[in-house]
Image (spheres, helix red, strand yellow):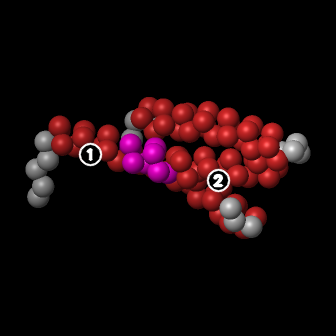
Amino acid sequence: MFNYSAKAVYRLDVATRTLLAVFGGYWGCAAVTLIVTRILPSDPKTAALTANMLFFILYTCVFIWVFSVRKPLYAWLGVGIPSAVFGLALLMWGGA
């Protein structure tokens, strides 16, 4: 039905992985950062600084992982499920 070239499929794959890493990874890492900020037993400034350093490490790892997975479905599931779980946990905890 559709006759896509290999070049077009590759570009679509890279585009979807980039969008996933940028938006899905950011949302999931931001939720983890907010949860870690609330969990850490130190003063709020130190907890926020520590959680933000963790955010940059996690976000970089998510971005690398999204492009290292063989199939895009695994990337979507691997980023989407944890992002949804941590986002829902944050919402149940009292929001941002």
Residue 12: within the magenta? no
Left or right: where 4 falls relative to 12: left
Horizontal side, residue 65 vs residue 73: left or right: right
**Residue at the spot 56% in from the left edge and 39% down from the top edge:** 59
Q: Are marks 1 and 2 in contact (CB under 8 Å)?
A: no
**Relative depth, front residue between 63 and 48:** 48
77 to the left or right of 52: left
x%, y% of residue 93?
Answer: 76, 64
Q: Is residue 21 magenta?
A: yes
Left or right, 93 with respect to 14, comes to right
- State the image coordinates of residue 12 (x, y, percent, origin top left): 26, 45
Question: Alpha carbon of mark 1 to alpha carbon of mark 2: how far?
Answer: 28 Å
User: Residue 68's x, y, as percent?
Assistant: 44, 32
Q: Which residue is mark 1?
A: 12
Quadrant position of the C terminus in the picture: bottom right
Query: In the figure, 53 relative to 4: above or below?
Result: above
Q: Bounds of the magenta span?
A: 17-24
Between disc 1 and disc 2, whose residue precedes?
Answer: 1
Label 2 residue SS: helix
Name the amino acid type tagged 1: Leu
Residue at (32%, 40%) from the top-left corner?
Answer: 14
Residue that carries the numbered disc 2 in the rendered image: 31
